[in-house]
Amino acid sequence: MSTIEKPRPDVDDPIVAGYWAATREGRLVVPRSTVCGYQLWPPEEVCPNCLQPGFEWQEVEPRGTLWSYAVYHRALDPAFADDVPYAVGLVELESGVKMYGIMRADLDALRVGAPVEAVFERLDDEVTFVRWRLDED
Amino acid sequence: MSSPRIAIAGIGATEQGELPGQSAELLATRAARIAIEDAGIDRGEIDGLITCKAPLTSHGTDEAMGPLLGINPRYSTTLDYGMAAFSLHLAAMAINSGFARTVLLTYGTTARSERIGFSRPIGGSSYWAALSGFLHVAGPAAMAMRRHMHLYGTTEEQLGWVSVAQREWAQRNPRAVFRHDMSIEDYLAMPYIVEPLRRPDLTVISDGGVAMVVTSSERARDLAQKPVNVLGMAQQSAIRNEQNEDKLMRPWLGDIARDVYQTSGTAPGDVDIAYLQDGTSVWVLQMLEAYGFCAPGEAGPFLTEGNTRPGGSLPVNTNGGQLSESYTHNWMHLYEAVTQLRGQAGDRQVAGAEVALHAQTHDFWKGAATILSTRDEA
């Protein structure tokens, strides 16, 4: 067991609190400007399209395609020493939003362009991570 | 094309490697002394100072350098990201605006001795990257390479020729940190760090100092060395951070290429030697395409043909680059470009090298490029 703790999100940070509230319920959401309707990822303090604060959390289909991925064979952060080898994917959602996430898949089966779906992994009462697996359907 | 107005008149460098007991400021000052001597100027003629912080540290500010250099230049400042091209361009701006006539550029790093930790999220979205274990520049570079392999059929062996070719160059450079033999078979036999990247695809981490004297081309003609003129320069940032390819495939490199060729009146075919920043080998592969040395997607075959190796059509990073020679964020690349253009590169001199491209990125945030030549025009 690694004794170094992995980074933990601050689920109360107002910029991201809505996201973590949704993942606890098994939903994937992204911020959408209430001023101009622009959908952005990652969340920021203001919308880079209209330079105004104010977002609503828009639920999106927790599916996408694997845009690319990288397989860590060396734990470049000791907190991930127990995880190697592991893959980080960049998932492109249907709306065009791209987000990073750890892949839950046979590493040899990963292919750019493969359909993927979200896995909601509960760490504790506060934190549920979004990981991704190959969508076999 | 107007005649060049800016030139590199002096260069200096320390040894590169593990140099415990020397501060970044001391290393930079030792290099500065050599550069001032090389240019053949008096220290008192320096009226501009641009220093660099080595990334991820607070070392090397102008206020830390002043006491060691013993000067009170009219204009002094520090760039937060310690990188050669951006410093050179800022010097050009200072000279062209009349702020200074003779600018000293300094850089020093103790990244090796200090064991600076690079295993942190890098690029965009660091909060999300950290949660996903997406750490170190190797991660984004591996992801970009995987995408390139998917789009164009590029192979690991083709990528391997970036670092094998640079090792061949490093073996002709006594200053290089990594000089042992490495064949393509040796490369392919090494384990992955972040697949598809292996250790030789990632930068050396070393200590060292580099400095340069920059002045007007007119003034440089009266100094000790053959002036190396800046024929053109360009920059482009990519500081927005959203759901696009800017932080991986870096399409904005193409904007820098277009502008640097336009401002210098050159084309890719005019470039005799190229210095492409190689924090990872993937950046070299990307820049070969972005700077027009081969078509998009064709960098793999271009590398396998041996174009970047000694004797090839486009010698790249003839000092060994960051993959074999030293860390220094493209400072030693600029040093090498000047050395080659002056014809002072010894065993690794590229015959007839008159035009050099020096292209740099601050990873995913911005890039800069310069066309350098001993000629007055393209």
Image (cartoon, coloured by chain):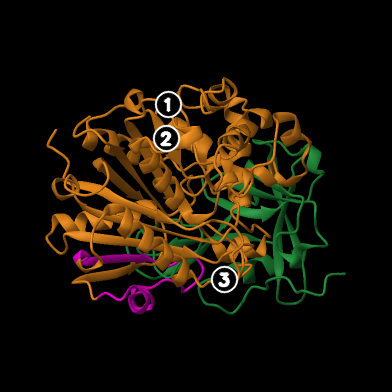
Label 3 element class: helix
Q: Residues within 10 Å of mark 2 (few under 14, many from 20)?
A: many
Residues tagged 1 and 2 counted as in contact (Cβ below 8 A)? yes
Q: Nearer the viewer, residue B289 or B326?
A: B326
Q: Residue at x 43, y 49 (%)?
A: B361
Mark before the other along the chain sequence, 1 or 2 = 2
The numbered mark at residue A21 is none
- The span from disc 1 to disc 3 (Cα, nearest Å) is 47 Å
Residue A96, percent from left and from top: 51, 45
Q: Residue at x 14, y 54 (%)?
A: B96
Q: Looking at the colours in the rendered structure, which chain would you say is drawn in green?
A: A
Residue, disc 1: B293
Question: Which segment did they paint magenta?
Answer: B45-71
Residue B152, above or below B328: above
Q: Mark 3 or mark 2, which is nearer to you?
A: 2
Question: Is residue B362 visible to the viewer in this orientation of the structure?
Answer: no
Q: Residues within 10 Å of mark 3 (few under 14, many from 20)?
A: some
Residues tagged 3 and 2 counted as in contact (Cβ below 8 A)? no
